[in-house]
Amino acid sequence: MTGNIRMAESIGQDENVWSDEWDQLTPESEIRMWDFYGLRHWIAKFIPRKGKTIEAGCGLGRYVFYFSEMGINIEGVDFSQPTIDYLNEWKLKNRYDAVFKKGNILNLEYPDNSLSGYISLGVIEHFIEGPQNALAEAYRVLRPGGIAIISTPSVSFYILYQKIRKKVKNIVKRTLFRKVITEKFYQYWYRPGKLKKFIEGSGLHITRYGSADLLFAFCEAGNYTEKYIKEGTFGYKFSNKHENGILNFIGAQSITVSVKAAEKMFCFFCGELKSNQESLSRFDVPVCSECECRDESKYYKKDSVARYCAPYIINPPVKKGEKFICNFCGKDSESSDIFEDYGFEKKVCSACLKIPEINIKLSNESVKPVWRKRMERNA
């Protein structure tokens, strides 16, 4: 009875709420936001290139479409049937190869030890009972050496200000014997250390975690516009300078990368079950002895962090398809109307983008951050 009452007070996991939310938006607009949420460099760096990955709670699937374009085997899972139906219609209409399934992230329809990757971006904080059950399910479906990339909102300086403001207002109301309205639960905000503890409690081994997305904290303060993040503003300069520094603890998001550790694990690079647990003391991902000699392994050593290659570009016009010469194969190509230049500083054709060695290099050296505000369907 208590559980039912608590869930009735929660809107964070209400299927109808999320169906209505996604109904106002389009996959095109979500893809073209690019780094409105500044985590793409983390995800692109650590998403497995071998085996199957899922995004648990994929929404309108912008990352599923994006990484499918890289040739990565990824499926989107969401509990909103209307959203899944819409995505499957949209992909056929636009001729994109991506997989979307209706599912419950507390009871995934994947066998034990079957997935190489699990992505969860701003999802597990919506469970009023806490994220433990969702994380336990992530652990179950990951294979030994599987990578989990999990983020939640953090307590940015703006969120902290709003919490203090609301608390003071409620104290004043009680003092004046006025009614304090109890809001329905929507989500928690987890600081990196708190999120780390939850994930470790599930059995996953944390290899990298921290705060991220300083720019979004200033975006929040500007009511989700570019008001405080335009080039030349304090928010823009501060965010670009300190995103990877000690002051990023006031960023808007907590991000973690973890591994399902075991004595023998699937190697991040070759996908073979021949990586030892000892490799995690030197790398953020499982690496077998043969793959340690690969050029790409340097990107995953403990002293290598995810970073953008340039300052943010704020709200640029959408680039239509244009001809270019691929920096990798030298052939003539044409950019995508929706994916533009795939968010990289270097020019890459669709064929080269699907080569793991190339997209790993791009994801570690050439992620170009572009911020565009979210556009509603009828805006």
Image (cartoon, rainbow, N blue to C red):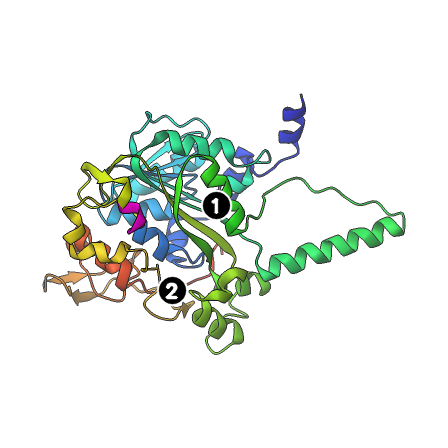
* Quarter location, residue 296: bottom left
Instruction: State the residue in front, 28 or 183.
Output: 183
x, y percentage for residue 133? 49, 31
The residue depicted at 45 percent of the width and 56 percent of the height is 37
Mark before the other along the chain sequence, 2 or 1: 1
Instruction: State the residue in front, 29 or 149.
Output: 149
Instruction: State the residue in front, 355 or 45.
Output: 45
x, y percentage for residue 1? 67, 21
Q: Residues within 10 Å of mark 2 (few under 14, many from 20)?
A: many
Residue placed farthest to the right in the image?
A: 176
Q: Which residue is mark 2?
A: 370
- 158 sits left or right of 176 in the view: left
* Residue stretch rendered in magenta on the structure: 279-284
Q: Which residue is mark 1?
A: 196
Is residue 20 at least partly visible in the picture?
no
Mark 2 belongs to which amino acid?
Val
The residue depicted at 38 percent of the width and 71 percent of the height is 311
* Secondary structure type for disc 2: strand
